[in-house]
């Protein structure tokens, strides 16, 4: 627990220093915004949306760890995960990665379970994000695809991802195959929990959108 406190204090101080440095570069922008109509109302709405989003992210990670056989009380994982979320807003996402490592070490969470949870977490966010883009930005997306340069770069990007993934799978197939099989088996046994994870991600996108709107 001492390591957790040290990391929490360090991340909090780093986040505060980063915020102060950002304000110090252009204080007039903050003062001008503070006198704008509905500034404090928007600030409270945005802060509440971000806080709820972080709570849901903690719940999601806890549920995903449960899918892969790591049953830890939410009372332990939640505060640690929430404290490390502060680090996500530092340059390079370093604090977030440090926080995950501390969770692994402090609560004896197997690296394999945490890795699977992170993979599914990323896939779920991508799926929900692409679905929202397809629904909400359909017209914009169709117009963008009509532009030859955009469509070309999109095709090149997708093909590059496929080629790299296929090459990695071939090179490390002896290690990856058992991992993937176990991952799929765990997911198949927890379909209801995965549906809840996807729903939470959808709500999370809405909360982040609300936070952006309020800013």
Image: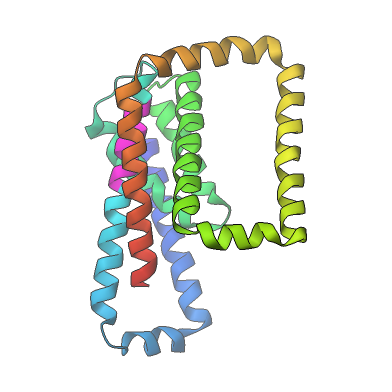
Which image quarter: residue 107? top left
Q: Which residue is rendered at x = 77% and y = 46% of the image? A: 156
Residue sitting nearer the eye, 65 or 14? 65
Task: Report the side of 135 relative to 173 (left or right).
Answer: left
- Residue 126 in picture, x, y percent from top left: 50, 42
| Magenta highlight: main SS | helix
Q: In the rendered image of this protein, does residue 10 appear above or below residue 48?
A: above
Left or right: where does residue 150 sit relative to residue 104?
right
Q: Residue at x 38, y 28 (%)?
A: 106
Residue 55 vs 43, above or below: the answer is above
Quarter of the view holding residue 197: top left
| Residue 162 located within the stretch drawn in magenta | no
From where the camera sits, is residue 205 visible?
yes
The image shows residue 102 at horizontal and vertical percentages of 44, 34
The residue located at (29%, 37%) in the rendering is 59
Q: Is residue 5 visible?
A: no
Report the side of 182 relative to 53 (left or right).
right
Magenta range: 55-64
Residue 57: where, in percent of width, then height?
35, 42
User: In the shown orientation, is residue 169 left or right of residue 85?
Assistant: right
Q: Is residue 199 above or below residue 214?
A: above
**Quarter of the figure that contains the N terminus:** top left
Q: In this orientation, which residue lies closer to the viewer: 208 or 16?
A: 208
Residue 62 lies in the magenta stretch:
yes
Q: Residue at x 32, y 39 (%)?
A: 199
The quadrant of the image that shows the C terminus is: bottom left
Image x and y of residue 129, in percent: 47, 47
């Amino acid at each position: 627990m001492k390591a957790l406190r040290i990391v929490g204090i360090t991340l909090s101080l780093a986040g505060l220093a980063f915020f102060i440095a950002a304000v110090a570069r252009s204080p007039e922008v903050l003062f001008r915004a503070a006198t704008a109509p509905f500034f404090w109302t928007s600030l409270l709405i945005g802060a509440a949306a971000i806080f709820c989003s972080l709570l849901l992210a903690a719940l999601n990670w806890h549920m995903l760890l449960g899918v892969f056989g790591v049953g830890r009380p939410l009372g332990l994982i939640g505060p640690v995960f929430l404290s490390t979320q502060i680090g996500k807003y530092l340059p390079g996402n370093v604090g977030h990665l440090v926080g995950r490592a501390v969770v692994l070490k402090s609560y004896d969470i197997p690296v394999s379970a945490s890795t699977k949870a992170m993979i599914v977490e990323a896939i779920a966010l991508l799926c929900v994000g692409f679905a929202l883009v397809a629904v909400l930005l359909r017209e914009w997306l169709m117009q963008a695809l009509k532009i030859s340069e955009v469509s070309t770069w999109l095709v090149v990007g997708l093909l590059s991802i496929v080629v790299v993934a296929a090459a990695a799978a071939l090179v490390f197939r002896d290690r990856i195959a058992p991992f993937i099989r176990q991952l799929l088996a765990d997911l198949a046994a927890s379909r209801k929990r995965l549906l809840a994870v996807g729903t939470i991600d959808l709500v999370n996108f809405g909360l982040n959108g609300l936070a952006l709107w309020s800013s």
